[in-house]
Amino acid sequence: MCYIVRDTTTYRASWPNPAPQEDPLATFNVHFSAGLTASGIAATSVMLVGLATAHQMVVYFLLGIVGSLLPDVDSKSSAPVHVTFALLSTLLAFVAMFYLANAFTSVAELLLVWLATYLVFRWFVFFLFNRLTDHRGLFHSLPAAALAIVTTAAVAHRLLDLSALDAWMTGCFVGLGYLVHLLLDELYSVHLFGMRHRRSLGTALKVYRKGHPVATLSLYLAIVGTLLTTPDPTPFVQTVVDPKVRTEFQNRFLPSEGWFRPRPTSGLTAEQGLRQPPLSET
Ligand SMILES: [Zn+2]
């Protein structure tokens, strides 16, 4: 049993055979599963090629899942959007708490910071979102995915003091989840199984919103404004285009010593491997 969010209505259907209602959108469960799968594969890959530690892999994995749920924050009163907003509010409350951990040293103060941030996002910002957004509006667009990436990178660098490489990596994992969500919505729009085009085709992977020039322009301006606060992407770009990373990925893609035989040495690790030599992180 799962939920399908369709405009302001919530109704039930069974997966993998959605009920034959007109224009069904991908379900919350499907988005969650797809985000979990894509994020899990990507996070494991970056760890195997030495771009992340095991701890970072877990964080990237979770951020990818959060990213895959983010576009539907513009849904109205439905169970999935409540879950998404609760998750997002919890995450942001921890960001605020970690950011202020040096300013306030008592547990009680930090717990109050956590609670205040959570309540503000969970109720006040949620209320604003409900009033100001339409489902499948600008949050289902490529520039919104770009904004999610740069905002995450900026927050990770400015508030959590992550290096440029790690900040952009976290941003890209949120972006990965976000794009998987948009892609899935589009795939549902062409109705893979019946290949019938639906009315919602083209409403997820769009670059602007028809009839909303001011909102679209504001979104692009927000991207540019946030970009100014992000760290220099050079260390990240240098790392991901490094031929050693590609070679390491190719070496790791299939087992070289036969299937399920543990390697005697673990090869490159994030601490001693590809993350450090070519980089001068800012
Ligand atoms: Zn969606």
Image: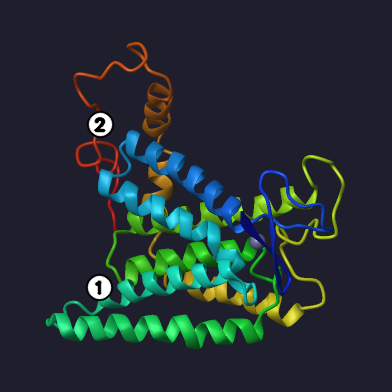
Does dot 2 land on a helix, a strand or a loop? Answer: loop
Ligand 1 has an atom within 8 Å of the beta carbon of the residue at disc 1? no
Circle 2 Cα neighbour tier, 10 Å, few/some/many (<14 / 14–19 / ≥20): some
Amino acid type of the residue tagged 2 in the rendering: Leu
Q: Which image quadrant: the C terminus?
A: bottom left
Q: Is residue 210 above or below residue 29?
A: below
| Relative image position of residue 94 (x, y in whole percent) | 31, 72
In the image, 81: left or right of 235? right
Circle 1 Cα neighbour tier, 10 Å, few/some/many (<14 / 14–19 / ≥20): some
Looking at this view, is 119 or 101 the one in front?
Answer: 119
Q: In this view, does 134 lie above or below 23?
A: below
In the image, 154: left or right of 109? right
Looking at this view, is 38 or 3 the one in front?
Answer: 3
Which residue is at a point 37% across and 15% down the rendered structure image?
259
Quickly name the residue at label 1: 98
In the image, 169: left or right of 141? left
Quickly name the residue at label 2: 268
Does any portion of residue 103 appear in the rendered image? no
Q: Which image quadrant: the N terminus?
A: bottom right
Residue 212 sits in quarter: bottom right
Ligand 1 location (quadrant) = bottom right
| Relative image position of residue 129 (x, y in whole percent) | 59, 81
Amino acid type of the residue tagged 1 in the rendering: Phe
Residue 80 sits in quarter: bottom right
Which residue is at a point 66% across and 47% down the rendered structure image?
15
